[in-house]
Amino acid sequence: MKKILTLLLLVVSLSAFSQDTYLQTGSEDLQEKAKAITDKYVDVLGLRAEQELLFRKKVEEYLVREEKIKATNKGEDMLNKMVALRQNEAAEMGDILTRLQLQKYKEVRPEIQPLARVKQ
């Protein structure tokens, strides 16, 4: 009985620490878009192969979140959520990029990934 309870507790705790599978279900279009965006950054930032893979996965993750925001929000509310999302993305890129790369990323990002504007 103790073994079963321990095994059950282990399975529950592992599932609590697992990755968010919702974010891993990006479409092929988003995967291609993430690859195209990453390719633009590779030369500018001088990404190594390992960084490039991590960077692409992070971009794809945030593209999925961006699509969800666009589908469920409109106008200024959407823009505010997109700005917050972009800030989170830049913060998480700090785990992948070096300090100099992150600084350059923040400089070129508005050109490579412009933020939508609200029409008034």
Image (tube, rainbow, N blue to C red):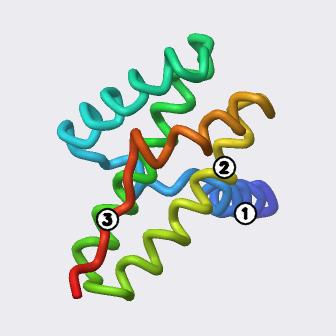
Residue 99 at x, y = what percent? Answer: 80, 34
Observer-nearest residue: 60 or 5?
Answer: 60
Q: Which residue is mark 3?
A: 116
Quadrant showing the N terminus: bottom right
Q: Is residue 2 above or below residue 81?
A: above
SS state under label 3 = loop
Q: Which numbered disc, 3 or 2, marks the residue closer to the eye?
A: 3
Is disc 1 in contact with disc 3, using a CB cutoff of under 8 Å?
Answer: no
- Tell me how far mark 1 sits from mark 3, CA to CA: 45 Å
Q: Which numbered disc, 1 or 3, marks the residue closer to the eye?
A: 3
Q: Quadrant for residue 60, please give it.
A: top left
Seen at 48% across and 26% down, the residue is 41
Residue 18 at x, y = what percent? Answer: 60, 52
Seen at 35% across and 80% down, the residue is 78
Q: Residue furthest left?
A: 29
Quadrant showing the C terminus: bottom left
Looking at marks 3 and 2 on the same chain, the residue that comes earlier in the sequence is marked by 2
Q: Which residue is mark 1?
A: 9
Q: Is residue 113 above or below residue 120?
A: above
Badge 3: residue crowd in 10 Å (few <14, some 14–19, many ≥20): few
Looking at marks 2 and 1 on the same chain, the residue that comes earlier in the sequence is marked by 1
Is disc 3 in contact with disc 2, using a CB cutoff of under 8 Å?
Answer: no
Residue 70 at x, y = what percent? Answer: 27, 71
- Residue type beneath disc 1: Leu
Give the number of the disc on residue 92: 2
- Tell me how far mark 3 sits from mark 2, CA to CA: 21 Å
SS state under label 1 = helix
Q: Quadrant for residue 93, please give it.
A: top right
